[in-house]
Image (spheres, helix red, strand yellow):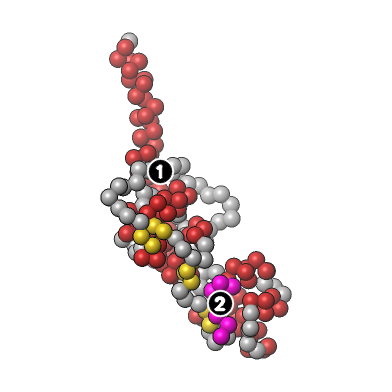
Amino acid sequence: MIPFLVGLGFLPSGIRKFKDQQGEKTFQRYLHAIDSLEAAGFVLISSPLPGFDPRDTLPQNQRNRVKNTTTISFWEADSVTLQIVPGIGEKLAGRIIKYRDQLGGLHHADQLKEVFGLKEEAYLAIWEYFDFSPQIHSKIPINSIETQDLSKHPYISYGEAKVIVAFRNQHGRYTNPEDLLKIKIFKPEWVQKISPYLDFD
């Protein structure tokens, strides 16, 4: 009877460990499928609705920060050093760096939450290893850029880029973000979102 009761005591921890392992494997297969779609040329966007996530939490043994590291600037991070963060593997690290560079920098840390596949726990853990300061290192020359190049920015679709360029060609140079609001189909929230990346010179 005693061995049986002892066995029951270990059962919950055994189940949790099994669930962590299975969840990790499922999540990695899920991210591999996403990476395959990206490689095939598909553009991935985040759903506005809650999505299925096979890993509810990171395994307990991954939550302890490695003691032999020192924090560095997030702008010095690359797809190798980012893998020190629990929950971030090679593919996700590459996706984070690619998104950061495509944006032209970040004016708020929360923008990283837009990276597909980045879990909340992993996002928070990034700032245990890297320091963040707002930085925009590449701006859009809104008065000279053409549609194709403008649409490469993650916040601007090809259709939006066409309208911006067409309005400029018809009405002249933009002088400030408010000029974009003269295009009635654009929401103020969206104009405010892209404003830090615009160069009006």
Q: Which mark is residue 198?
A: 2
Quadrant where the N terminus sits is: top left
Quadrant where the C terminus sits is: bottom right
Cα distance in 3D space between marks 2 and 1: 38 Å
CB-based contact (under 8 Å), mark 2 and mark 1: no
Q: Name the element at disc 1.
A: loop
Q: Residue at x 35, y 30 (%)?
A: 14
Q: Amino acid at mark 1?
A: Leu
Q: Which of the 4 quarters of the picture holds residue 163?
A: bottom right
Frontmost residue, 170 versus 189? 189
Vertical relation: 99 (above or below) 55: below
Q: Residue at x 38, y 50 (%)?
A: 87
> Is 139 colored magenta in this rendering?
no
Frontmost residue, 102 versus 133? 133
Going from N to C along the chain, the mark reached first, 2 or 1, is 1
Q: Name the element at disc 2.
A: strand
Task: Return the residue at label 1.
Answer: 58
Q: Position of residue 130 (x, y in %)?
A: 39, 57
What's the magenta region? 195-201
Residue 36 visible in the current orientation:
no
Image side of residue 4 versus residue 107, left or right? left
- Mark 1 surroundings within 10 Å by alpha-carbon count, few (fewer than 14), some (14 through 19), many (20 or more): some
Q: Residue at x 51, y 73 (%)?
A: 153
Q: How many marks?
A: 2
Which mark is in front, 2 or 1?
2
Vertical relation: 135 (above or below) 27: below
Q: Position of residue 172 (x, y in %)?
A: 65, 89
- Mark 2 surroundings within 10 Å by alpha-carbon count, few (fewer than 14), some (14 through 19), many (20 or more): some
